[in-house]
Image: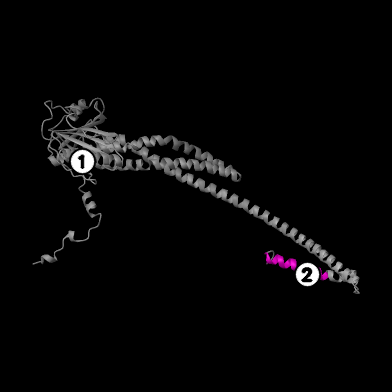
Amino acid sequence: MTDAGQISVASSFEQHPLRARILGELHARPLRPLESPARILHLAFLVDPAQAEADRLALDKACIERGLSGPDAQARQFRLEFTEAVLLWERHGEFITHSWVFGQGEALAEDASPFSPSPASLMQKLQMLPQAGPLLVAADLHMVDGDADAPALAKIFGPLQMAVAEVFDGRALIASDFAPDSFGFVRIFIANRSMPAVAAGGLAQRALEIETYRTLALMGLPEAQRLAPSIRRIEQELPSILEALTEAQGVEGNRKLLDELSELAAELETGAAASLFRFGATRAYDDLVQSRLKGIGEKSLQDYPSWTAFLTRRLNPAIQTCVNTEARQADLSRKLTRAAQLLRTRVDTEVEAQNGALLRQMGERMHLQLRLQQTVEGLSVAAITYYISSVLNHLFEGAEKAGLEIDPTIATAIVIPFVAVFVWWTVRRIRKKHGGEE
């Protein structure tokens, strides 16, 4: 029998600070059962951190007014039950969703036709939360029990082409034209043939995620279209600059080309930095759309495109445009960098050549200055010798007048060589002392 005091449980160990968060991530967005018939009005708002927090506080206030506990500061998902509907609130990286679920398992109206009553009449029954931010996604999902006829659904969705398919091994049928109706909602119809509530909830969630993520994925397209003229102009100007590079002469000409390249590079990098997040998000959202489409296991119907075929044909060109724009930015950046490096090397080489010529000129001038200095020093020795000799001559003349038998001229002539040597030696010492010679 095991001693109870020796039993260890996981909670008794020191926990990694991220363990709870990592484990909880797998259950952050659980599939919620959905009884059919049901109606979901799904709204997604783009928000910044301040707007996201304000929306959470508004939801918290709505909960307090009903005597309920609201979402905490770290909550990513929350459920709030009203009298006639249930609100599913979710917070994502750059958007927040409000999903209003009506009439689970009960008739929504005497008129059993799809998407009746209208979204406007449904929303009037609720005390709406304040708008969190700019509205990006508005979807109206209607799930009914039983089967549905594709041609009849095509009449409901109108003149635009409808995408319809069987999913979950034929246990349900989904249809949509992915176009907003007169109320601004994209309508999604689901016929629940034999799905239990859990599977129905999962299908509804995936269908709404497909609509949300495909809309967010397309946000990169306007950014790519905005950048296209600038990228095209840089692509056209770069070859002319490179051609001028082969003919440019002199430092000033090369520096002018380098300035032009630097301006193009700055413009390109500004656009690339501004679009970096959007293009990365576009790829991520597109991957999510493809994974959700794969998850519902579509089987196409004759004469109608499936959701995968419909969305792929329309999404792929837009996604590819974003990918190509990002690739063109990267390719141009590399070319501009190489051209700028080449120009800088040429400018540096020419500057070094100019510096070398300048140093040679300075050396020649220093040599001339040294020769001139030596000449001046020679003249200085002669002048100083002459001056000292003149002083000594006066001294000798004074001595002769004082009665000494001295010939001033002969005495002066004798001392001149000694004076000259002394002056030369003194000047040489002074020059050595001040670094004139080693």
Measuring 86% from the left and 71% from the top, which residue is drawn there? 414
Assign a secondary structure to mark 2.
Answer: helix
Percent x, y for residue 80?
Answer: 17, 39
For disc 1, the marked residue is 60
For the record, the magenta segment spans 417-434
Assign the C terminus to one quadrant of the image: bottom right
Q: Which mark is residue 343?
A: none
- Nearest the viewer among 166 and 118 is 118
Quarter of the view holding residue 223: top left
Quarter of the view holding residue 369: bottom right
Assign the N terminus to one quadrant of the image: bottom left
Q: Is residue 44 magenta?
A: no
- Left or right: where does residue 176 sit relative to residue 271? left
Q: Amino acid at mark 2?
A: Phe
Pointer 1 or 2: first along the chain? 1
For disc 2, the marked residue is 422
Q: Residue furthest front?
A: 402
Principal SS element in the magenta part? helix
Percent x, y for residue 19?
Answer: 23, 55
**What colouring style does the render use?**
one colour
Q: Amino acid at mark 1?
A: Asp
Residue 3 visible in the picture: yes
Dot 1 and dot 2 residues touching (CB under 8 Å):
no
**Can you say whether 435 is above or below 92 in the image?**
below
